[in-house]
Amino acid sequence: MTRACPGGGRGPARRDPVVYARITGGYHTAVVDDHPPILPPPQPPYGPPPQPQYGAPQYAPPQYGPPPAPPQPQSAVRRAAGPVAVAGAAAAKYGLPLLKFAKFGPTAISMVVSIVFMAGLFGPAYGIGLLALIAVHESGHLLFARAEGIRAGLPVFLGPFGAVIGLKQPLKDVRQEAVIAIGGPLVGSLGAVAALLLAAATEPGTYTHNLLLALAYVGFLINLFNLIPFSPLDGGRIASALSPWANLVGLGVIVLLILVPSAAGRTFNPFLLLILLIGGISTLQRFRNRSLHPEYERIPRSTRAGIAAGYAVLIAICAVGMAEVHSALLSAQVATTIQ
């Protein structure tokens, strides 16, 4: 666009200076500028903030009043509340399984340790099979205890020294003690019979056949040894229902098992010394309790006769089974030598 210049000529239009007022915070300032910026229309000092216009620069309205307070740091309790809540949720989710594991923990841990030890001592197959026979024996005690209404803990394995279970309440009399004690050799002998039947179902001369025969033999041997009438063995607890003097017979048997190999120049099992020590203390304690609690041994004669008959049958089964398996092992050894 052009306009008339002074003197009548024509030329480019000249912009006149613009005077405008900037009103901010109650102060009026006059500004002279050839190129004034595009500003929003002036507003009263305390009126509403100007509305933004397209293309116009944005200005933050003035702030009145005290400045905002700085953020306060969280207290130690509030900082700890988060981790505590997470830990509580984790305990609720995983605590119950851990409590359940605590019930089976001693049994599981002792079993794993015993498997590793016995596998290294006897080889994996024989070691695991031997531990299985011990577990079957202990399960007999557990089943008979529960049948008698006695609460008992799960077995804790002691490697080649067997296993133990703990009774969680006192026994009523010698009959109940004998019944729980007889359950181990009874069920354990059935485990040895099962190993013998499995061996008969396999081909003679094979590794599996000979392994099962060896396990059947040691199964009968373990249960026959436990029937020696001497505490803490099962036989001592069974024979005590017949007479406390039966433990003296068992004491003589243990002494012979120590002296005979020594006289022949062979090494005896040192575990027998431990049994002799514990059994001697247990026998003395039993005679002492007999005078303090005579009612514990008062059971009917018919009950004594039944316990005696079952005890004798179990000894015969283990002895005959051990002799038969021993003959089978000799035959397998001869057949292997001939081949």
Image: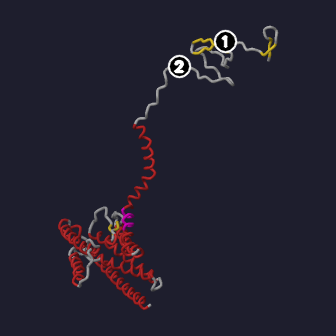
The answer to whether one can see residue 274 in this image is: yes
Q: Which mark is residue 89?
A: none
Q: Which residue is rendered at x = 65% and y = 21% of the image? A: 51
Tell me the crowding category of disc 2: few under 14, some 14 to 19, or many 20 or more residues within 10 angstroms, Cα based: few
Pointer 1: what residue? 19
Give the camera-side residue of 227 and 72.
72
Could you tell which of marks 2 and 1 lies nearer the N-terminus? Answer: 1
Residue 147 lies in quadrant: bottom left
At label 1, which amino acid type do we have?
Val
Q: Give, as a single range, the part of the protein colored magenta.
A: 106-113
Give the camera-side residue of 203 and 100.
203
Pointer 2: what residue? 64
In the image: residue 37, left or right of residue 304: right
Above-or-below relation of 43 to 145: above
Majority SS type along the magenta span: helix
* Secondary structure type for disc 2: loop
Residue 328 lies in quadrant: bottom left
Tell me the crowding category of disc 1: few under 14, some 14 to 19, or many 20 or more residues within 10 angstroms, Cα based: few
In the image: residue 140, left or right of residue 295: right
Which quadrant of the figure contains the C terminus?
bottom left
* Secondary structure type for disc 1: strand
At label 2, which amino acid type do we have?
Tyr
How many callouts does the rendering have? Answer: 2
Give the camera-side residue of 149 and 336.
336
In the image: residue 92, left or right of residue 55: left
Locate residue 275, reporting x and y percent: 25, 73
In the image: residue 308, left or right of residue 120: left
Locate residue 111, reporting x and y percent: 38, 67
Residues at marks 2 and 1, CA–CA distance in whole angstroms: 30 Å
Q: Which residue is rendered at x = 47% and y = 84% of the image? A: 203
